[in-house]
Image: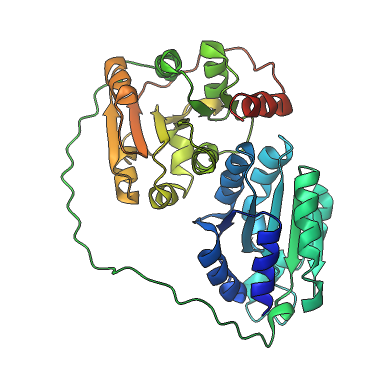
Amino acid sequence: MLEDFVCDMLKEQGIEFIVSLPCDRTKDLCALMEAGFHYVNINREEDGAGVCAGLALAKRRFVLQMQSSGLGNSLNAMMSLTELYKMPLPVIASWRGYYKEKIPAQIPFNSKIPRILDALEIKYTIISEPDELVKLKDVIEDAYENSRIHVALISPKVWEGESCKCPVRIVPDRKREIHIEYTREIHEPVMKRADAIGVAAELLKNELTVSNIGVPSKELYAANDRPENFYMLGSYTQATPIGLGLAVGQDRDVIVLDGDGSLLGTAIMPAVAAENPKNLTIVALDNGAFGSTGSQQTHAWTGCDLELMAIGAGIKDTFKANSEEDLKEALLKRTNGPKFIHVILKPGNTDAPNIKTGPEEIKKRFQDSFL
């Protein structure tokens, strides 16, 4: 069967991870992928770009699998992360909106995808017939050999008439009891984000650290520049997805310095809980503001509680830090991760200098520090 052929080809190419948000046109392929690979189930396609970036930093082999409409959600992350740092990203996209499409909403974006990819100079290969599936090999090899994005647009026509004997999924019982006793106090903040980053920076040893875009990365650079720091220069919301990919891709401890705005904008937390990496710590630097853009208030200031959000996503080890002492205690406490530390902060930025290291050098020295 064609789906078996594709999975066998992926294995021949050394693919270990499938990062996926499914499409109904490739549900049989997704079922085989789930059974045959480490299958990372995401909720937003752009988070897949971040998870794959983390896996790329760990030099693992992966593909991102999605419906082509998900490219619309992913393009900024692909360009400001994958393209910026020159990372490989092979994408298997079920191409909707042009062949026997019955859903009108699929047509306006998907019918224009080749022109959009051309405008962004993203490499792509169209696969219109079953015998063209062999081109997937070239897509994967090109992405890894040239450290770039390469999208395979697979027509639904390819799967017509196919009858796949997919493995029977073993589905756990849905029934469960949920007990939450949650009482926390958020004090008036005494630290700013730079203070919290300084506390974390002093404690860093061999941990791999991913820092959020904008001023947080500059503040970590000023506090303790080290090869083990991966400074994000773009890609809003992608700090924790990168950390997740990095944590599942290798064994070193990973610390993500994320922000409240970023975490409120991503759908990665349930995926973190599902993957359950023991070596991942997420430090949520919550100043209730979009700090790098003028300290506009976020919903975390008086509404959403990020620690409770993490608990609701399924993360069991969570902490609230209102002071430097709280933060030190939480960072030093060894848990059976993943760990989520919610740090309450005052708004405000420092005059930290710009990062002098370019994106490709950031990537190279980061990888050299642990590979």
Query: Residue 277, relative to residue 321: is it above or below?
Result: below
Which residue occupies 55% across, 64% down?
36
Q: Is residue 22 left or right of residue 201?
A: right
Instruction: Identify the image quadrant of residue 30.
Output: bottom right
Instruction: Identify the image quadrant of residue 326.
Output: top left
Q: In this orientation, does residue 186 appear? A: yes
Q: Is residue 314 left or right of residue 350?
A: left
Foreground residue among 148 and 169: 169
Query: Residue 270, relative to residue 336: is it above or below?
Result: below
- Residue 236 rendering spot, x and y as whole percentages: 57, 38
- Residue 319 rendering spot, x and y as whole percentages: 28, 32
Foreground residue among 73 and 209: 209
Specify the color scheme.
Answer: rainbow
Q: Where, quadrant-wise, is the C terminus in this rendering?
A: top right
Q: Where, quadrant-wise, is the N terminus in this rendering?
A: bottom right
Q: Is residue 133 left or right of residue 223?
A: right
